[in-house]
Amino acid sequence: MKLFWKLLSGMLVIIILSFAVFATVLLQSSLQHSLDKETKNGIEEMRVLQYAFLAAIEGLSESYTVDERTVGRLAESVAANASDGRSAICVYNAGGLSVYPAGRRAGELFDMLSVKEPVKNRSRCVWRLVRENDGRAMVAMARIDCLGQEYYLEVRRDIQDIYDRWEEDYRNYRTTLLTLALLAVVLTSVFAAGFTAPVRKLSLAARDFSEGAYGRRVKVRGNDEITALMRDFNGMADRLESNIRALEEHARRQEEFTGAFAHELKTPLTSIIGYSQMLRTMELDEEDRRLAADYVYQEGRRIERLSRKMMELIRVGKLGAERQRVETKRLSRLLEKYAGVRLAEKNIDFCIRLEPAVLWGDMDLLLSLCGNLVDNSRKACKKGGRIRVSGRVEEDGKRYRIRVEDDGQGIPENELDRITEAFYMVDKSRAGKEGGAGLGMAICGRIVEAHGGEWRIESRLGEGTRVSVYLPLDGADERNGDE
């Protein structure tokens, strides 16, 4: 069952049941109050008639004979003078036969009252509510001692009008209950619809979100628990969308990475297989054989470099940096030795000036970082180009900035955000000539991240590129944090 119907049926049951119980108790209480009041009036009237009857008997002269005929005339006189017109009087003798009016037989009250009791209880009366053919009545009976004889005075009071009023009230109650039920259906439907509307919106938004509409959100209005739930849903949706976009981007890069890796392997493997097949199946002179073997060797070295770069990329991503004290003087010497031979091939003006300091990092990875940056600058520079490597302590005293600048071809602005992707190459033809695989900048990014550093790449097409790397200096707080 849907929440709307649960709310509607539950509220209707509560409202109608509450009204029904309250009205029923009220009607029954009113009926009982009227009956108690009428019973009290009936008993009081019976007492008045009883005293009036006794007073009439005592008013007779001593010579007057009191028999049943006399008692009957006295009862008739008392009924005419003392009764309020709603009550009927009947007088019975000790045998239970009516003296006034004649022809009746006493009922159950007579049997209850005629039982012999102590003198102190002989004036008590009994009463009962009875249902008759012509309606309902309250019947009361009292015993009268009349000059040594016992008579029984019965007062029958008509109370049918009380039940008539009660039945009229009950009919009005049923009409009111039906009207209230219809009104409750309308009002509770509106309330339940308003209450469940945000829930339906949340359900639709969650369904759309699950079907791929990651930008789906709900409008937040109000300041109750449902509103808080809607805010939480929007917050959750924001985080999920961000994570999903990140996963999609990661999957895209993984796919591009796999495709690029397969492509990078395909070219040298094709050459190796082709020239190997030539060596196996064709008769070649010494010069052609040497040329084919040289192609196989060069392409094999290319695959070796690619695998080495891949292993370095994986190693940095999984193992991170083993940090220790790294002196910039030693890093400068190793970098100059590493880059000197390759830069000399293109007659590049190379200069290193690193301000003396102690870094907190991995020497091998930092050398690889600087070496890759210098190598990328070498590939971008023409013969006779210029590369500058500088380093200094930042003003905050906590970081060391290494900057690599060149006057090479530069990078288009729209490609700056992608150069750290694996196998991405700005100029594929140039990278092919230089033996690049598009992994150098991806490795640099991993190394900077592993050291908890930052970097910034600035470039202008045709003017050159400047890469600034910010690394932590050696300090107690950094060492303690890593330990």
Image: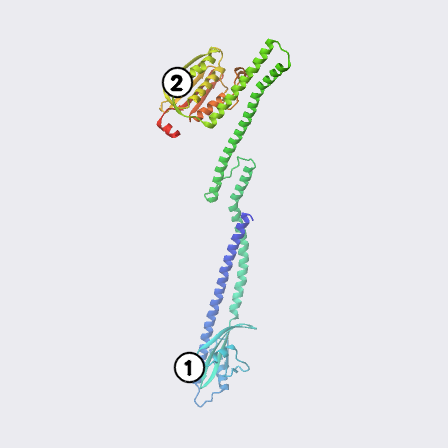
Q: Are marks 1 and 2 in contact (CB under 8 Å)?
A: no
Identify the image quadrant of residue 276. Answer: top right
**Where's residue 274, x and y in %?**
61, 17
Q: Which amino acid type is shown beneath numbered disc 1?
A: Val
Which tag, 1 or 2, sits closer to the chain's start? Answer: 1
**Where's residue 155, x and y in %?**
49, 77
**Where's residue 404, x and y in %?**
43, 18
Mark whose residue sits in front, 1 or 2: 2
- Closest to the observer, 22 or 234: 234
The residue to which callout 2 is attached is 330
At 35% across and 27% down in the image, what residue appears? 476
Q: Is residue 417 visible?
A: no
The residue to which callout 1 is attached is 119
- Closest to the observer, 13 or 373: 373
Q: How is the image coloured?
A: rainbow
Q: Is residue 217 left or right of residue 280?
A: left
Secondary structure found at label 2:
helix
**Where's residue 294, x and y in %?**
56, 13
Most extreme residue toward the bottom, as rendered?
Answer: 63
How many numbered circles does the render carry?
Answer: 2
Residue count near mark 1 (Cα–Cα under 10 Å), binned few <14, some 14–19, many ≥20: few
Image quarter of the C terminus: top left
